[in-house]
Image (cartoon, helix red, strand yellow):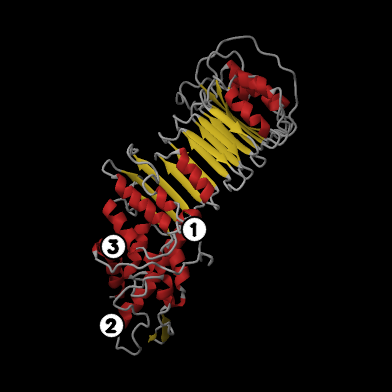
Amino acid sequence: MATCYVSICGLALDCSYMQLLSQSHHCRSPSTATVTSETQPILSQHKLLRLVITVLHSIFTVNYCIKSLSPATTAPHPYRWKANPPQSFAEMRKRPRNTPATREVKGEIVEDLMSLLPDDILINIISRLPLKEAAKTSVLSSRWKYLWTFTTVLDFDGITESSNCISDPTCIDKVLQLHRGSSINKFRLCLYSKDLHESEITNWVYSALSKRVQIFELELWPRLKNYTFLENCYNNLKSELSGVKYLRSLRLFSVNVTGEILEFILHNCPLLDQLSVVRSETLVSLKVVGSAIQLKHLRISTCYRLNEIKISTPNLLSFKYFGPGQELKLHIENAPQLVDISFRGVMLTRVRNVVGPITSCFPQLKTLELDSCDELYAQFSEHELPNLTHLHLRVATLNRESLLGLASIMKACPFLQTLIVQFDYNGYKVGRRRKVPRHSHQHLKLVELHGFLGRPIDLELAFYILENAMTLEKMVVNRTNYSFGCGNAKDCTKLREAKLRQGVELLVL
């Protein structure tokens, strides 16, 4: 009977979820308490956390079943909600906490272990579950009925099509109405819908920001041309009471946003350290300028109307850009901590627009990722990157006679430890083997060659590295070409037969 009851309760979880959202609840009043996240989670891994919930659920339902089938020998469960749900975390904690209910079963004392866990730990666990599963916990007991409404993570993912995701606009509205927590650690809204309205998104965004959200992610497919992030609630955000100042991370994917709004966020969010903007059609100019800006990581990708980026802030650590660079005006100054730069999407033309501005960062750079061309090689020969340890280059092989121009880049990085080269395009010219000055690389330990097809120019570069990397530990040769698929990769027999220095591992994929 107990086993049967547990199974029935498990099935009831799915049914109760939709009933829960469809019920009309009392209006919530502004919360004054904050659910702290200082308590460390019992378990950090998602699967183990789900197991904790399952075990606790089983313990409770078995105890409840035994209690319902046996003569009552103890008082009712000590945790009973009043007619009205709690309006804040502080109000919820004011309820009486008595000794957990116990019962003697076959000579053993059975205790309700759930009642031993404090609310903040339970909320911490619930916040790590998918939102739909978190809502299902409301049927476990009267104590659990409203715990999920204090979750600190609201993740609405309508793109992965998971059964645990909430993507229906009506459900999103109800969840936000039911949420009683005063703060949100993470708000993620990823939707694929052609029927979304600008007013709906504006209300959801403003609701999240009013809850002092720390991590905010918005992704819309397809992009709504008539929607611009924060445009309609821009004036409200200027209020001193606005929760936007608590932002730590902002990620906008396929969402239009203007440079004016981004600059407002940068100057009014003292905790913001990560900003990512992908596929915005309205971003034309971006200025990250100011000594008070705390931004550490900046990513801009495929914003094709962007024609100017100006960076002058002492705290920036990482800058990643992907997109056309022919007309882009890049200005970088007063960025003493910028050690990680990635500039992709600029092939063959006007690379000087890119390399010129970042040369001021060469002495401090540790990681660099670039699309390369012959003009790039010439510029590197004039500079040195004494602290660079990781170099990632995408090389166009079209109409090339040799790839040994990379040797000048390697020479400019005396302490390089990792080199990754990605070959693009199939075409090349047959020419004489190029002679370059021999230069030993004393710190290069790992080399990865992707898109390697065994052509003469490929083998020429591979042999040069094997001969001159004195401390090389591993070379990975991946014959998959990212531009044209696997194709007809030529035989790498010559490379396999190469005489390797002792301790060098050659891996051909």
Residue 125 in which image quadrant: bottom left
Above or below, 39 against 168 in this view is below
Residue that label 2 marks: 69
Q: Residue at x 31, y 50 (%)?
A: 167
Residue 478 in view, yes or no: no
* Closer-to-camera residue (249/474): 249
Give the mark count.
3
Q: Nearer the viewer, mark 1 or mark 3?
A: 3
- Name the residue type under label 3: Tyr
Q: Residue at x 37, y 62 (%)?
A: 134
Q: Residue at x 38, y 53 (%)?
A: 206
**What's the distance in space between the residues labelled 1 and 3, CA to CA?**
24 Å
Residue 47 in view, yes or no: yes
Residue 256 image position (x, y, % from top left): 40, 39
Residue 147 image position (x, y, % from top left): 38, 69
Instruction: Give left or right: position of 136 versus 369.
Output: left
For the C terminus, the image quarter is top right
Q: Nearer the viewer, mark 2 or mark 3?
A: 3
Tell me if mark 1 has few (under 14), some (14-19) or many (20+) residues whose alpha carbon lies within 10 angstroms of its own: few
Residue 414 image position (x, y, % from top left): 73, 31
Tell me if mark 2 has few (under 14), some (14-19) or many (20+) residues whose alpha carbon lies within 10 angstroms of its own: few
Element carrying mark 2: helix
Element carrying mark 1: loop
* Closer-to-camera residue (350/387): 350
Asked whether disc 1 touches disc 3, contact meaning CB atoms under 8 Å apart, the reply is: no
Residue 319 in which image quadrant: top right
Specify the label residue 201 is tagged with.
Answer: none
Specify the label residue 45 is tagged with.
Answer: 1
Above or below, 331 against 178 in this view is above
Residue 388 in which image quadrant: top right
**What's the distance in space between the residues labelled 2 and 1, CA to CA?**
37 Å
Residue that label 3 marks: 17
